[in-house]
Amino acid sequence: MSVLLADRTWPEVREAIERGTVFVVPIGATEQHGGHLPLETDWRLCSVAAERACRLAAEEGVPALVTPPIWTGFSPHHMDFPGSVTLELSTFIELVSQVARSLWHHGARKILLLNGHGGNANLLRSAVQQLRFQHGVRAAAASYWDFVLPKITGWRRSRPGGIDHACEMETALMLAARPELVREEHARDATWFPNSDFLSGDLAVGAPVAVTFAFSELTEDGILGDPTASTGERGEELLAAVAERIAAFIREFYGWDWDRPQTI
Amino acid sequence: MSVLLADRTWPEVREAIERGTVFVVPIGATEQHGGHLPLETDWRLCSVAAERACRLAAEEGVPALVTPPIWTGFSPHHMDFPGSVTLELSTFIELVSQVARSLWHHGARKILLLNGHGGNANLLRSAVQQLRFQHGVRAAAASYWDFVLPKITGWRRSRPGGIDHACEMETALMLAARPELVREEHARDATWFPNSDFLSGDLAVGAPVAVTFAFSELTEDGILGDPTASTGERGEELLAAVAERIAAFIREFYGWDWDRPQTI
Amino acid sequence: MSVLLADRTWPEVREAIERGTVFVVPIGATEQHGGHLPLETDWRLCSVAAERACRLAAEEGVPALVTPPIWTGFSPHHMDFPGSVTLELSTFIELVSQVARSLWHHGARKILLLNGHGGNANLLRSAVQQLRFQHGVRAAAASYWDFVLPKITGWRRSRPGGIDHACEMETALMLAARPELVREEHARDATWFPNSDFLSGDLAVGAPVAVTFAFSELTEDGILGDPTASTGERGEELLAAVAERIAAFIREFYGWDWDRPQTI
Amino acid sequence: MSVLLADRTWPEVREAIERGTVFVVPIGATEQHGGHLPLETDWRLCSVAAERACRLAAEEGVPALVTPPIWTGFSPHHMDFPGSVTLELSTFIELVSQVARSLWHHGARKILLLNGHGGNANLLRSAVQQLRFQHGVRAAAASYWDFVLPKITGWRRSRPGGIDHACEMETALMLAARPELVREEHARDATWFPNSDFLSGDLAVGAPVAVTFAFSELTEDGILGDPTASTGERGEELLAAVAERIAAFIREFYGWDWDRPQTI
Amino acid sequence: MSVLLADRTWPEVREAIERGTVFVVPIGATEQHGGHLPLETDWRLCSVAAERACRLAAEEGVPALVTPPIWTGFSPHHMDFPGSVTLELSTFIELVSQVARSLWHHGARKILLLNGHGGNANLLRSAVQQLRFQHGVRAAAASYWDFVLPKITGWRRSRPGGIDHACEMETALMLAARPELVREEHARDATWFPNSDFLSGDLAVGAPVAVTFAFSELTEDGILGDPTASTGERGEELLAAVAERIAAFIREFYGWDWDRPQTI
Amino acid sequence: MSVLLADRTWPEVREAIERGTVFVVPIGATEQHGGHLPLETDWRLCSVAAERACRLAAEEGVPALVTPPIWTGFSPHHMDFPGSVTLELSTFIELVSQVARSLWHHGARKILLLNGHGGNANLLRSAVQQLRFQHGVRAAAASYWDFVLPKITGWRRSRPGGIDHACEMETALMLAARPELVREEHARDATWFPNSDFLSGDLAVGAPVAVTFAFSELTEDGILGDPTASTGERGEELLAAVAERIAAFIREFYGWDWDRPQTI
């Protein structure tokens, strides 16, 4: 049987909740990803990672289900490129929050908001704070790449700035997950890294100061990073690692006693 | 090539918009549908109808694309049944509105909000009013069954009250679209029609007065209607008719000059 | 004694609530109605219908009271014509909702939102959903003309498009209710019906697709429909039928047991 | 012809606006007024005052029109008494604001928000600030009794605390304006004035500190003040003075050049 | 020990609350005050007054603490002058409200919102209403000058219009409180009083009608009033009186039984 | 002259803006910090760091000003400890945003939101996104400790979990900045670090998954971390480093051309 929540009937979901099932909500965006990747990239990748992780968890006896993906993210910085869809900040937070609150209402107690879009990351952490203190709902949030940050260091071939958007990482993962939708002929090296000690231009590099730019200010075709060294094989390697780490978290998460945080 | 917007890259969407493409946004819900239908029923059916209609339109040279489905509807009346997900009224309207505004922002001028959930119907008509006068965005809204109301009269075998929720119509359509997800052994006749001259309990019967009930007040297993006479064959017949009528509208819509409404 | 809530003192209202009184809230708009009808048309007509119906109900022993009319509707489509007043969508819904919640707070359990403006109709149905599931308040909503749709078929002399705004119906009703305010010399036939299988331009004709236009896009003087065959006599005939049907509903409504919807 | 905006057609309003007409919006509440006054008291009194003032202004050639009264005020402090209706603070401000913005949209430049309910007074002053700086709309706000504060000193027979709610002033005015709705047998002296140098309990007495109480904390039947000395004759005297002063303001207001405030 | 809340640790605050401490929240603005007063004027003056008053109260055994000042007021009318900071109306009310609700949450029952900016005055009275009826929180609100209105009559040397903004009063008080920040060479007489029976242009003069202007419509350098007769000595005299009256209120307030308002 | 914005008059601010001054907005919280640190800790530390940094910048000719501190943060997780003040998430974001928008309105183009409270960090990054895309305002956001993360590694004596709240770092910094307010006798080692590969309990340690707990779930006296090794000398060392790095950023920031992001 699939790990998709939406395939189930309500009595089946009731039973799943009684078993302590972990619910994973993939949250991405529908937005430009250069000339070589489809609009679906962000929500597709976190969906694929979520499904794989849930299957891995299930194989070890930990029940886990994936909701449909939230495909509407916070993407105002991409709106100069046709096809990009964005929500306003508060609507995005409310959408995610109300999905989590619905699940919690039915008794689900292990909800993971699994992010696939850089522009959503802070907002999801904020949503977790609001869920807890405004609505009494506990949830966990994470971006899929953060599960494998150490691995990425060894995996990557690009220099700093190579992993940002429609980049080495995303292109490799899409070549693994949805190769038929990658137009490799439009991939190009569009690495950019700010000339500053205080800023970053790479998902795997930290920096103290946050600023934000429209993508059209930085790139002509929407790429920031270097997809030219991406292959399906390398993508599959990374995707497998992502799924494994998320599955490891799902197993740990399943065992948490939320009401006694000091035991976690 | 598919009719799915999310499969495309942004330069492809730019071109599609320049050709006057009709964009169809399937809008459903993820909610209980009795013991025999999966949670996906509402968003799946409007997605399937939308895709079929767009392919039919495309075959006659009218470009049309389908966005991913909005799977979070207005479903508070189902929240006593596990797995149902609901948005608040204002969040639902904003979500739909912001998707439409994003498309409009890029130049799309023919946007059809295609509904598959009864609880959304009034809200989408309200959203169209708000889009037009608060945001300057034109859109059309319709529920898929309203395209075939006259046909349903002849098609149905159930008495009034037989077509409401997880009913004769929805079960037949799911047997056509997603037979592997229908648990027919849990279907039962749960027809209800109010004993009033002023109310209706059937999607195909009108009435002057609007009231609203929680489903748990009316049905134990979530069914309202009679799915027992539903077959995949009858479902396919209806689904084909739905897709044909929507395709007909898409063709007409494609030709409208919004700026000269009197010519429509 | 009058059927007006606002004429009463609070101890009198307390007694009325204890008797199970039905409260009717007339909801219209203050907006242009061509050169021949006053701005008050929408709220006046639903107020008059409500008062007549409540008197009829009272004559048969069913207690019913009418609140002052909500004269601020959702009318952005009329704002190109001076004197029209509009609320934003969310403010309109909140206004209506808070009036209903106030009555419910005091113990009123039978609240009818009686609409007299086309642009409000979907919003009131949405308000009923929100009242029930966000605030725990039950209310019924209806537009006065929907009570007599079958009768209108025989009554009307205009062709499709003749009954829409400042039209055959509204002009006749105002000639019955407020003849001194009708400037008949400015009435003219301004019938419009879209050339489409999917749209309607008449309050008494259904259609699957909802779109919305500014009135200034369709008519120079604000009329849509044909008031030229309207007379006070025909208006009185229709008004009497409207009041009778609403009274019939009030009597039925009075007997409902909201807590056992299946008995309705 | 009447001074009621809603009696007019849109071309007539267009003409009125072109003549620089002053628009008066009566704003009251529908709320308990003891056992002797009807729920309508607040909105009725400001409507009557507004109509009289507009007629007086018109007699001197200054065009003025009265909108229908806003009968939904900010009255949470009265909600323990049946029949009272209240809006939330923000909804009340938005309602008033959107009425003013609608009139301004059509070209009206002299809008007076004429208040008849103590609980609205601060909110209307706040609304004027918001209208000006958030919406670019100029309006004036005043409570009718503030126009005659000096006169009240000589007119009153009650001690401090006698003029507050369902009091000497309101009862006298209702005896003048709507004697058939006053149940004098239920009037009683319910004067209350706080034993504090910093608070007031009288509309005609100022104090530095603002606090707020529910009426049910202070009075059993909803009266605060002393209606026992009120007569229709004394009410007529005060009502005439109120109307005269408002008319004087309307005449002055008509002449203001808003764009050159220093000339006012 | 200081009277500053923020100097304390949480166990100390717990103890203070148990003793029935009065909490004073200074609420001002950061906005232009002519060429001679700093941006801090409004929040500084209400902070200084609050601290002095709390020390006076404490000397008589009444515990009182001052929170940090809210330095972001409602100041859109000053935004043509650089450095002015403004909140939107609703944000300002929420900010104040949430500070009061936080204190109430911990058990504080005597909260005084002490205002130092004219543009905030109505909003704080509105906030008190909302706190009480939307949140169940009791608070008192006052502007510091309202505590000494009678004294100001004798104290002032300016004519009507002399006390409004960056005026005789504020300049004197700043000369007493923060003389090092007053640039006296830029003070000038900029008295303005409207030529109307219905308006005021002086904090110590009442008027029935409220309107609002941008300061740039009325004054070139931001002054309205006459600071030329202000001295530190006269400022100290007034400041001492202000602090004394607030202290007197704090002592009275400390003894109130909120739950029995009729005893106040 | 001080670096405090609020000390200035508006003509002085106008001049400062014309010179390209960097504006630093310290943003903290007023909340419990164990039994040994005062409520002011968070807003005090970022204020002190901001002032020092601005003075350092000024010494090198880069103009910089500090606004008053925003002392109301997002602190619901501290509300079980008396004296803590919290805003709702959306109010906090709006407050910060409107301060930044006010400065931008006057022409300021270099605005740094300098955070001193862990609970604010994500929200400020979200605010920067909203400012840019909803309001067209560019701002930078950073938490003061993120400027010295590498240094902290060598500086700290505590094990993981030692730097979180009222901890080694904050206690040392307060001993440097406000020693008179530190009650060292109440400091204790309350180090906590989750037993998980996916979570962190230390400001200087990263982790992929975000969850949130109330402090009362984790600590009895509000401390998380180890303040026992903190000294004023070590605090001064760290504070100097923080101020130096922020000053370095201010100098760099001063030179940015926002309109050409690729040059940064």
Image (tube, coloured by chain):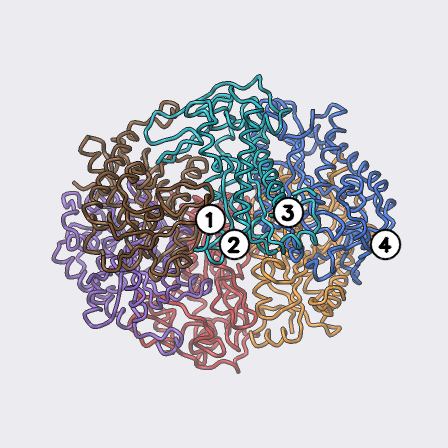
Chain colours: A purple, B brown, C cyan, D blue, E orange, F red
Label 1 residue SS:
loop
Find out whether the residues at labels 2 and 4 contact each other: C-beta distance under 8 Å.
no
Parent chain of label 4: D
In this image, C12 relative to F99: left or right? right
Image mark for residue D73: 3
Label 3 crowd (10 A; few <14 / some 14-19 / many >=20) = many
Q: CA distance from mark 2 to mark 3?
A: 20 Å
Q: Tell me which amino acid carries mark 4.
A: Arg
Image position of F133 with respect to E247: above or below:
above
* Front label number (2 vs 3): 2
Parent chain of label 2: C
Q: Which residue is nearer to you in this view: C209 or A140?
A: C209
Instruction: Locate residue E247, reporting x and y percent.
Output: 74, 65
Label 4 crowd (10 A; few <14 / some 14-19 / many >=20) = few
Label 3 residue SS:
loop
Q: Residue at x 52, y 63 (%)?
A: F86
Find out whether the residues at labels 1 and 3 contact each other: C-beta distance under 8 Å.
no
In this image, B31 relative to D96: left or right? left
Q: Tell me which amino acid carries mark 2.
A: Val
Asked if residue D102 can be seen in this view, the reply is no
Please name the residue that numbered disc 2 is placed on.
C137
Marks 1 and 2 belong to one chain? no
Count of all numbered marks drawn on residues in the image? 4
